[in-house]
Image (tube, helix red, strand yellow):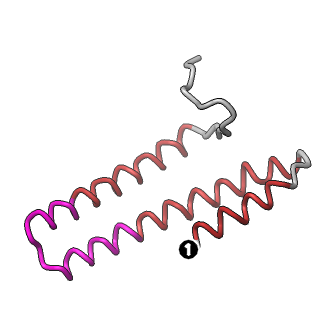
Amino acid sequence: MEEKNVCPGCKTTERPEEEKIKLIHRLNRIEGQIRGIRGMVERDAYCADILTQSSAANAAINAFNRDLIASHIRHCVARDLREGKDEVIDELAVTLQRLMK
């Protein structure tokens, strides 16, 4: 088994390979969008066009976050609650507050 480079004391989440691949593909698309926006700025593209692309990248990040938080609740939070770790509720509340800024 491959050893992961994880900081001591950091929490980790074992994800099914299919979910991990899906998340990475989304991030790759978002990364491409960001590179495209940078290219538009470098080429002095029209501001409204850049803003349209920026809005699309924001929507893509929000969709990524929605999928990840749903998975987190279904798996991590549910598991911790079954194990009696009620502090996960406070952690989830803080996480959701950060996402809603």
Image location (x, y in percent) of residue 68? 58, 56
Locate residue 23 relative to residue 38 in the image: left or right: right
Amino acid type of the residue that numbered disc 1 sits on in the rendered structure: Lys
Of residue 13 and residue 44, the one placed in the foreground of this image is: 44
Asked which quadrant contains residue 13, the reply is top right
Q: Is residue 56 magenta?
A: yes
Tell whether 27 sits left or right of 36: right
Q: Is residue 67 above or below residue 23?
A: below
- Left or right: residue 83 compared with residue 93: right
Q: Residue at x 60, y 39 (%)?
A: 16
Which quarter of the rendered picture does the N terminus lie within? Answer: top right
Q: Residue furthest left?
A: 43
Mark 1: give few (<14), some (14-19) or many (20+) Cα within 10 Å: few
Residue 11 in which image quadrant? top right
In this view, the residue farthest toward the bottom is: 48
**Quadrant of the snapshot with the C terminus:** bottom right
State how many labels appear: 1
Q: Nearer the viewer, residue 29 or 87?
A: 87
Instruction: Read off the magenta span.
Output: 36-58
Residue placed furthest toward the top: 1
Main SS, magenta region, reads helix
Name of the residue lying farthest toward the front: 8
Q: Which residue is mark 1?
A: 101
**Residue shown at the point (48%, 67%) measured from the top left:** 62
- Image point 64% across, 60% down: which residue? 70
Place of residue 9 in the rendered image (x, y in percent of width and height, measured from the top left):
69, 34
The image shows residue 46, relative to residue 18, as above or below, that is below
Residue 51: image location, x then y, percent: 26, 77
Secondary structure of the residue carrying numbered label 1: loop
Q: Is residue 44 a member of the stretch shown in magenta?
A: yes
Please give the name of the residue rendered at 52% of the width and 42% of the height, measured from the top-left corner. 20
Q: Nearer the viewer, residue 8 or 17?
A: 8
